[in-house]
Amino acid sequence: MDSTNSTQQAAKPEQKQGSASLKSTSISLIEDLIGNRMKISYQQFFVLLKTQHKQIMDNEEQSEIESQLAQTEPPEEEVVTAQEEQQKQYIGGDDVNQQIHENVTRIDREMQQSDIDLIRKSFKGHFVFFSLPEDQIDKLIKHMFYCTLKANQFIFKQGDQASSYFVIEKGSVEIIINDRQIRTLAEGSYFGEIALLYNATRSASIRTLTDCGFWSLDHRTFKKTIEELMLKDYDENRKFIDEVPFFSFMTSEQKDQIAHALITSKFAPGQAIVNEGDQADSFYVIKSGEVSVLKGTKEIRKMGAKDSFGEQALYEKSKSVATCVAETEVKCVALGRENLILGDKVQIIIFNNIMRWSFDKSEVLQQLSKIQLEKIAQRAKIDNYKEGQVIVEAGKACDKLIVVLEGVMTNSKSDLVPKGLCFGDQFLMREKYGQIIDSEYAMVRDGVLATISYQSLFDIFGGDLETALKKNENSHEKKITQLGERADASHISFEDLIYIEKIGQGQFGKVYLVKHKSINKMFVLKSVSKASIINQMLEKHILQERTVMEQCNFPFIMGFVRTFQDDIFIYFLVEYLRGMELFDVMRNMGPLTKYDTQFYVATMILALEYLHSKSIVYRDLKPENIMVNDAGYICLKSFWAAKPLIKSKNYRTYTIIGTPHYMAPEILLGKGYSFNVDLWSMGICMYELMCGKVPYAEEQDDPYEIYEEIMNTQLKFPTFIGDGQAKKFMEQLLSKQPETRLGSSFSALKANPWFEDFDYDKLFSRELQKVPYVPPKDRMISEHDIEKKFQLGEPFVQEIQQERTMRNQMYRKELARDPNWDKDF
């Protein structure tokens, strides 16, 4: 969790227009340890490691670290490869002081309409604000304060801690980088907006040319206000959705997603909400007020709270058939067709939900695995049927599974099969298979059915039903439920560890390879200075990192063993992952084949499914954070960015964190994000595996340009990628609409047609016939060298005593915000 030596060149100012781009020097090819983290300004993102893929971290998650970027040391980590390594940069922390860092004088002044207009105009110039609705803009403006500074004074200097955004109300300033004037800004211009997203260090100096006045907004106020407003809007929308009949067909999870996608709008009396003949692209539900519906100039009805209009827009492209005008002040929530969850038309979502609910009701089908059920739902054919149409003929055996989506089926005995139930599932059992139907089944009225032949079912099962059920006894789904909690490691004592060698050096301590003296097992031991933790106010982060790791017990996630402590250090004992980073493996292999990509992406899916089931969002999925072990299987490492999400905050967080090329676009929009950011990162990884590069801004070093390309550029594929199913799957994962990435579940991802020929059960059991790549032995510490050093028998306590003697920084418990923060280590 420490920082590494890096080189940094001049960064551009935060005022976007006319700014200079950052060019940074990459570090030679290295292998990474886990625990990497970094907090820097957008313009400083790329002063790091072995390619342009770097990482950042928000100060809201960690405490401020005051050291300069170019003066940092290699960090210590929690898991290592087998070679001595150089580390990525980490600078980050909590802004616990909640203070304004800039050199301005705060003045009490009443805001005039001209000031509001000036601020609104500045807000329209940057993505930090443009996606915010008007009511949120109004709240932010109310929280702004007025401040002044005399001429020829620095508001802040390059490298200073940043806390506020400024709009120039009067006067002018100059932007200076490395003692060179870049440009000047006058009344109405803005600067420092990146400070609102996280507590960056300034990438430029700003000096007043004249006496100046500013309207300013600080980071803490911005973040707190946005989070409160988003939570309030979500709570209101979620309760409202439960009261609107239109949404009754949705699952609880889908309603949660819709609540986040709804946009609240206000309309003044007499204002048209939709106009007859215009393109219909949104569905509206009235929260308050009265709306008049006009056909031409004739009023045909009035609508009030909980009434809705425009639903046809969600089913198909169409034009509005009437004009809707606000009679009073009206507040509506709107759901646009492009924002519809799951990426499907409403009718498809309805039918898929009914199918899945019918499977749950079937005593036969509920025994199938989740992947099998998803494949049935995906392959079932949905058709309309007329009243009286015969569905199952008498005197023949049933040859298909039928789900009633609309209408009712019946036979001459008045046996009914209503909406939401299956027919034909009972004949899948071996003792009933082939049984003759003695009475035909027909539609009572017009309706909709989903059907799938028994032969298609057997193709999904790999045999008949009994064969499928027997196979499912050994399925990965069942095995995951049997994993249980992490094994108790309290019997492993500090004194039992034999020193092998030091494999990492950091600002806060060192990383060691050790071996237990009696159980013949290797571990990695990371030491973290207590003094450094409290000096940098990292107590909360170090506790969160341990909490996340303690919850995990999964074969494709780095194993956490236990922690130790003494009066100077905290120690993390973790699994030793012998192998190479996927990043380096990819460089050795070049663009991967379909099978190789399936292998790695499927493992990522399993790992993310497990983490999300624990309500943990990973937030930094990339090849550098994935180890390929000496058997060729992969494991997630580096949990510095992982965070538990809590229900009381609707499983959302607002922290700016991650690696620019792999960060989902919603992270920067200020409205909060959830687990779906990990699926975006997985999509980037899949693209990189197949195409040999990332899809956005591959050649860019400037984070600003990276984000602009991610936000504004359509996904494109190289001409040599001819796998249509792979492209469609990547398009789903890389959707700019977060809710569409997962589909209905992780099982739906695993059942995607692109994985048709891939066996998840054998992957989980590590029984696949081949793995894409096995790291060569010369890239790992040899077992002979390890055994030789183990035979020397040097206790680790002896090695650490030398470190304790050399350590200048002593831990003073009384300086900690909570003197007992380390009691559970």
Image (spheres, rainbow, N blue to C red):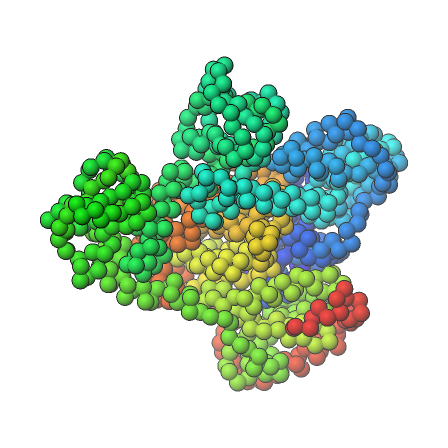
Residue 510, image x, y percentages:
65, 69
On-image quarter of the N terminus: bottom right
Judge whether 487 appears above or below 97 on screen. Answer: below
On-image quarter of the C terminus: bottom right
Apparent side of residue 658 relative to residue 284 in the rendered image (left or right): right
Q: Quadrant of residue 616?
A: bottom right
Residue 174, image x, y percentages:
79, 34
Apparent side of residue 765 relative to residue 271 in the rendered image (left or right): left
- From the viewer's side, name the closer residue of 337 and 502: 337
- From the viewer's side, name the closer residue of 28 and 384: 384
Apparent side of residue 684 relative to residue 653 in the rendered image (left or right): left
Measuring 80% from the left and 67% from the top, which residue is drawn there? 815
Q: Residue furthest left?
A: 395
Let me know if residue 33 appears in the view: no
Judge whether 611 appears above or below 714 on screen. Answer: below
Let me know if residue 517 appears in the view: yes
Measuring 72% from the left and 57% from the top, which residue is drawn there? 63
- From the viewer's side, name the closer residue of 507 and 762: 762
Residue 53, image x, y percentages:
57, 50
Apparent side of residue 122 relative to residue 267 in the rendered image (left or right): right
Count the marks: 0
Measuring 47% from the left and 49% from the top, which residue is drawn there? 252
Measuring 49% from the left and 76% from the top, which residue is drawn there? 783
Q: Residue furthest right?
A: 150
Q: Residue furthest front?
A: 414
Residue 271, image x, y percentages:
59, 22
